[in-house]
């Protein structure tokens, strides 16, 4: 992706002179173009938009490993280790999807799901427990689905893509109704 952006602007001599610097910064950002300059790459007519996923879990290992896998798949990952932090991050960043652990100290994942759903942020749940009653309760709060721990990011990607598409469809229906 970085090479495509850089190659589109090869005729601009000013851009060509800083091309290696921009390419290095893009690589440092893990393939996700962020605001590496005051106006990022918008001055050059291209900006890569990434899907933002809020990952919420009280286990640091899950945040690190699952987050890395999702980032490697091209998603822009936001992290929260508890319910309060999740709601703050969601309010400030408007993620495209939140993946929330069900059982956490403080605010439960189901309560977080309800609040995010009210803010029109789609939610999937993450759980180590295959408890039907809890999962039914999570789905009743508007969750699009759930993933069972331990998580393999590569195997979770199709489920996440499906949830994102379903969320887009639901948004289109709500917009059409208004």
Image: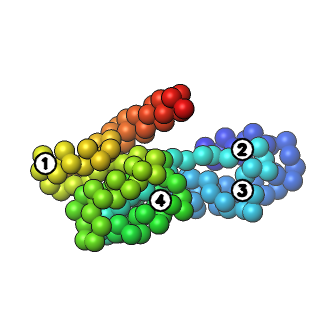
Q: Earlier in the sequence, mark 2 or mark 1?
A: 2
Does 121 sit above or below residue 60? above
Up-down relation of residue 178 to residue 74 (above or below): above
Q: Quadrant of the N terminus?
A: top right
- Can you identify the residue that label 4 sits on? 90
Q: Earlier in the sequence, mark 3 or mark 4?
A: 3
Residue at screen point 29% across, 42% down? 145
Mark nearer the viewer, 2 or 1: 1
On screen, residue 29 versus residue 160, left or right, reads right
Q: Secondary structure at mark 1?
A: helix
In three-dimensional space, the C-alpha distance between marks 2 and 1, rounded to whole angstroms, equals: 47 Å
Q: Earlier in the sequence, mark 2 or mark 3?
A: 3
Q: Is residue 5 left or right of residue 28?
A: right
* Disc 4 to disc 1, C-alpha distance: 27 Å
Q: Is 90 displayed left or right of 63 in the figure?
A: right
Dot 1 or dot 3, earlier in sequence:
3
Q: Which mark is residue 46?
A: 2
Is disc 2 surrounded by few (<14), some (14 to 19) or many (20+) residues within 10 Å?
A: some
Counting residues from the N terminus, which is met first, the one under dot 4 or under dot 2? 2
What residue sits 80% from the left and 43% below the top?
10
**Mark 4 element type:** helix
Q: Which mark is residue 40?
A: 3
Q: Which residue is mark 1?
A: 133
Dividing the picture into quarters, in which one does residue 103 lie?
Answer: bottom left
Residue at 27% x, 56% y is: 110
Q: Position of residue 90 (x, y in %)?
A: 47, 59
């Amino acid at each position: 992706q970085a090479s495509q952006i850089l190659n589109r602007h090869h005729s601009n001599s000013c851009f060509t002179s800083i091309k290696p610097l921009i390419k290095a910064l893009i690589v440092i950002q893990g393939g996700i173009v962020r605001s590496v300059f005051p106006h990022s790459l918008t001055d050059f007519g291209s900006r890569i938009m990434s899907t933002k996923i809020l990952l919420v879990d009280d286990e640091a290992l899950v945040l690190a490993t699952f987050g890395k896998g999702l980032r490697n798949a091209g998603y822009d990952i936001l992290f929260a280790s508890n319910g309060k932090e999740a709601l703050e991050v969601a309010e400030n960043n408007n993620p495209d999807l939140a993946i929330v652990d069900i059982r956490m100290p403080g605010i439960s994942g189901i309560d977080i799901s309800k609040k995010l759903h009210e803010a029109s942020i789609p939610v999937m749940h993450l759980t180590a427990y295959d408890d039907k009653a809890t999962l039914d309760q999570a789905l009743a709060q508007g969750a699009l689905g759930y993933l069972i721990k331990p998580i393999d990011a590569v195997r979770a990607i199709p489920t996440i893509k499906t949830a994102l598409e379903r969320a887009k469809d639901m948004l289109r229906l709500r917009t059409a109704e208004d």
